[in-house]
Image (cartoon, rainbow, N blue to C red):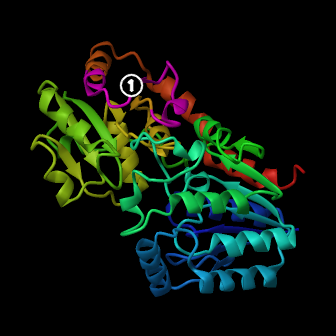
Amino acid sequence: MKIVQINVTCGVGSTGKICLAVSQLLNERGVENYILFSEEDSDYEYGIKYADRLSIKLEALKSRVFGNYGFNSKALTKKLIAKLDEIQPDIVHLHNLHGHGCNLEMLFNYFKEKNIRLYWTFHDCWAFTGYCPHFDMAGCDKWQTQCGDCPQKGAYSFFFDKSDKLLSKKKELFSGLDLTIITPSEWLKGLVKKSFLKEYEVRVINNGIDLSVFMPSESDFREKHGLKDEFLILGVAFNWDERKGIDVFADLASTLPNDCRIVLVGTDENTRKLLPANVITIDRTENQTQLAEIYSACDLFVNATREDTFPTVNIESLACGTPVLTFATGGSTEIIDSTCGMAVEKNDTDAMRNAVLAIKESRPFTEEACLKKSAEYCKDDKFKEYADIYFQK
């Protein structure tokens, strides 16, 4: 058996790390496998990069100019198909394809011609919309019938709204496949079952984390920042904006009592301009171990994301013994239960503030309960689920 994974990256970012871990498990089982990727670099022995940076930038520009996101990149797709022809895989496992590295029409016609068995992990909603990886904030449900007059067109095209045409193309291309869809959350599975892809089998494999890194850890974080008895509230993101709830943290910092302090990781100069001076900002951590130390030093992790599929930051916090308070968004609530966290209605900042104060007062969640819940998301177990599915048909 030969297996190929196709993703934007190899070993970089959350999806790239999943691909790498699955590949390494397959190597241990003696299965010939490769990762075909288009962006970033990797020295992984079985990673094959088929695109260069300039080509990706040009294809991204073409997509913005012509509005045909996912249907450019013909030359790159020829290279990708040539690699597939060379390897002749029995199974192709797709991950993120929306990085300007492939032409969907060429690639899926190839899959149909070769009758290749496919698995496709949806890390967001892009496969069943005209343009959008996420549509919650836009409040749009056109994807359930037919896209058009896209409220987020400006994010994908300078001039043209082709969301109607692109969704129609996807409906045609993604039919008649030997395809199993994988989602990281029940929430996303539910959306798939409302889409034109509802006839396919959908399996849920949650994201996992490294529990040997994310665990309760001692540090001098409080001493370093002059904190002693303050109730520390943590937020972690790597592209802070309204989608990630930067405005919610600014409001909390301005209205919570003085013995509550907010710590935000993943900030930059632009982010700091949006925040009150009493927020402790950390642009980046040196490594994941340092991040685990910060999780451990805080009393509560707040996830104010308004659009998310299955946020691993929630799991990382629980694994460090810190409970989670989240907006009821996407798959975020699936990670917690009543023993280790709670959720409030999305966009209800007053409810978020009241929940912070209630948790501070009553301390209802224990470190033990948080650790017990996080044990359900050990990366080795989750990656094994990925590797196992290939042998279940």
Few, some or many C-alpha atoms within 10 Å of disc 1 (few <14, some 14-19, many ≥20)?
Answer: few
Q: Position of residue 72 (x, y in %)?
A: 56, 77
Q: Position of residue 185 (x, y in %)?
A: 60, 39
Query: Which residue is most to the top?
Result: 362
- Residues in magenta, as a range: 329-353
Left or right, 189 with reference to 330: right
The image quarter containing residue 357 is: top left
Residue at 27 percent across and 14 percent down: it is 361
Left or right, 229 with reference to 356: left
What residue does disc 1 label? 345
Relative to 206, does residue 299 appear above or below in the rendering?
Answer: above
Q: Is residue 88 visible?
A: yes
Q: Which three-letter amino acid code belongs to the residue tagged 1?
A: Glu
* Front one among 268 and 179: 179
Residue at 39 percent across and 15 percent down: it is 364
* Front one among 138 and 23: 138
The image quarter containing residue 114 is: bottom right
Q: Is residue 208 visible?
A: no
Relative to 309, does residue 231 appear above or below in the rendering?
Answer: above
Residue at 67 percent across and 44 percent down: it is 205
Q: Position of residue 371 (x, y in %)?
A: 52, 31
Judging from the image, what secondary structure is the residue with disc 1 in?
A: loop
Is residue 167 located in the magenta-colored stretch of the structure?
no
Q: Position of residue 143 (x, y in %)?
A: 56, 47
Relative to 219, does residue 260 appear above or below in the rendering?
Answer: above
